[in-house]
Image: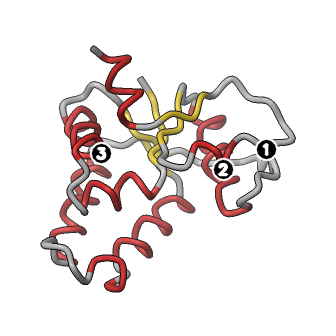
Amino acid sequence: MKIVLDTNILVKACKGSYHANRLLAACLQGKFTPLVSVTLLAEYEDVLARESLFCDDKLSLAERNELLDAILSISQWVRIFYLWRPNLKDEGDNHLIELAVAGGAKYIVSHNAKDFRSSELDFDIDVITPMQLLEELS
C-alpha cells in the first residue's frame, strides 16, 4: 500500500513516539511503501537537521540521517509533473497532496490531519494518524 509520510511522522519517530516508530518499522518490513518527491526529501533533510528540534533527544544528527536513509531505501520516488494546488490552510502541505495524487497513495499519514481538511479540491486520499493506519493493518 502506498502512503505519504508527513515530516512530523519522522520527527515523532526520532523523539520516540511508539506509533510513529511502529509505522516506520511496518514500512521497513514492506507492509507500506512510502512515496517521496524532491520537495518532500528537501523538507525531511531540512527538518531532521534542525538541532533546535532535537536538542533534548538521544538521537544524533548522524542517527537521524541513518533513519532517513533507511526510509528512503524502501521508498518509491515520484516525479510530479502537475501541481494541483489544493490551497490548504498550511500552504506548505500542498506538496503532500500533489505527491499522493501523482503516486497513487491511499493515505497521507500525519499528526496534523486537521491541516488537510480545508482543501479546495476533493481527492480520494485519506489523511490519518499512524495509530489509525496501524489499526487498519491489524
Depicted 56 relative to depicted 72: above or below: below
Depicted 53 relative to depicted 63: above or below: below
Q: Are marks 2 and 1 in contact (CB under 8 Å)?
A: yes
Estimate how packed mark 1 is, as few (under 14), some (14 to 19) or many (20 or more) residues with alpha carbons within 10 Å. few
The kind of residue tagged 3 is Ala
Q: Position of residue 120 (x, y in %)?
A: 86, 41
Question: According to the image, label 2 marks what residue?
Answer: 115
Give the camera-side residue of 32 and 109: 109
* Image position of 100 (left or right of 22): right
Label 2 to label 1: alpha-carbon separation: 7 Å
Q: Earlier in the sequence, mark 2 or mark 3?
A: 3
Q: Which mark is residue 37?
A: none
Estimate how packed mark 2 is, as few (under 14), some (14 to 19) or many (20 or more) residues with alpha carbons within 10 Å. some
Q: Quadrant of residue 25?
A: top left
Question: According to the image, label 3 marks what residue?
Answer: 20
Estimate how packed mark 3 is, as few (under 14), some (14 to 19) or many (20 or more) residues with alpha carbons within 10 Å. many
Q: Secondary structure at mark 3?
A: helix
Q: In this view, which residue lies farthest toward the right?
A: 120
The kind of residue tagged 1 is Ser
Q: Residue at x 35, y 71 (%)?
A: 48
Q: Earlier in the sequence, mark 3 or mark 1?
A: 3
Label 2 to label 3: alpha-carbon separation: 18 Å
